[in-house]
């Protein structure tokens, strides 16, 4: 009976240590934002393309808004979003709507649901060779590239796939 408990304790300890190591080096991340399904996301070695979910540090243009919203500048925080456009694709955010390759995608809001002013990246351009535009249509108020601009490949921390969502 004691050896069974000892073995169970060792298995639990091993699983806890493994899970801790995976979280420590960001193999697995927890997403709580509704713009991508909340859950656990695994780091994978995949190429960057439209539809791929990536994580990246909060861009400098977004930090003042994040600070106003949370009280933190978020220098060490990450955002998880799907890629909506990549190199060579045209983005237009000059008006009230986001256009990707001439296709109307989503409204661009000036204020959030608590009437805080949102940053607004304004451009009509073709993305450069290592630029990606992230956008989520899962919720109307996704905080994405409409507000802080394209993400460079250097800013991308990892490509993610859902491991477990809720």
Image (spheres, grey):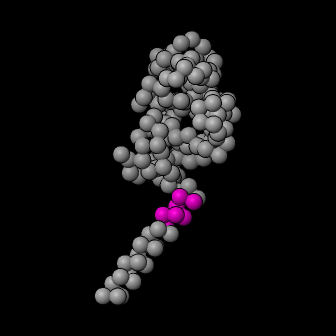
Residue at 54% from the left image edge and 64% from the top image edge: 21
On screen, residue 147 above or below 83: above
- Across and down, in percent, residue 143 comes to 53, 30
Residue at 48% from the left image edge and 63% from the top image edge: 19
93 or 108, which lies in front? 108
Magenta-drawn segment: 18-24
Q: Is residue 82 left or right of residue 145?
A: left
Question: Could you tell me what secondary structure mostly forms the magenta stretch?
Answer: helix
Residue at 65% from the left image edge and 46% from the top image edge: 76
- Across and down, in percent, residue 37 comes to 41, 40
User: Can you say which quadrant of the picture contains the N terminus?
Assistant: bottom left
- Across and down, in percent, residue 162 comes to 42, 48
On screen, residue 71 above or below 15: above
On screen, residue 138 above or below 47: above
Among the 4 quarters of the image, the one containing residue 139: top left
Q: Is residue 31 visible?
A: yes
Q: Is residue 61 magenta?
A: no
Among the 4 quarters of the image, the one containing residue 61: top right
100 or 115, which lies in front? 115
- Judged from this view, the residue extending furthest toward the top is 95
- Judged from this view, the residue extending furthest toward the bottom is 2
Residue at 58% from the left image edge and 22% from the top image edge: 116
Q: Is residue 91 visible?
A: no
On screen, residue 53 above or below 123: below
Q: Is residue 19 magenta?
A: yes
Q: Is residue 5 left or right of residue 141?
A: left
Q: Is residue 9 left or right of residue 75?
A: left
User: Can you say which quadrant of the picture contains the C terminus?
Assistant: top left
- Across and down, in percent, residue 123 comes to 64, 18
Among the 4 quarters of the image, the one containing residue 38: top left
């Amino acid at each position: 009976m004691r050896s069974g408990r000892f073995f169970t304790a060792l298995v639990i300890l091993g699983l806890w240590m493994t899970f801790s190591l995976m979280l420590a080096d960001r193999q697995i991340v927890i997403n709580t934002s509704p713009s991508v399904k909340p859950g656990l996301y695994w780091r994978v070695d995949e190429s960057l393309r439209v539809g791929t979910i990536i994580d990246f540090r909060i861009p400098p243009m977004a930090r003042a808004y994040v600070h106003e919203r949370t009280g933190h500048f978020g220098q060490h925080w990450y955002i998880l979003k799907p890629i909506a456009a990549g190199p060579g694709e045209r983005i237009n955010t000059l008006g009230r709507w986001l256009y990707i390759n001439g296709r109307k995608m989503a409204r661009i809001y000036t204020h959030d649901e608590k009437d805080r002013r949102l940053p607004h990246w304004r451009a009509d351009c073709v993305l450069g060779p290592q630029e990606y535009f992230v956008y989520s249509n899962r919720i109307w108020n996704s905080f994405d590239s409409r507000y802080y601009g394209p993400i460079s490949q250097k800013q991308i921390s990892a490509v993610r796939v859902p491991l477990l969502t809720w």
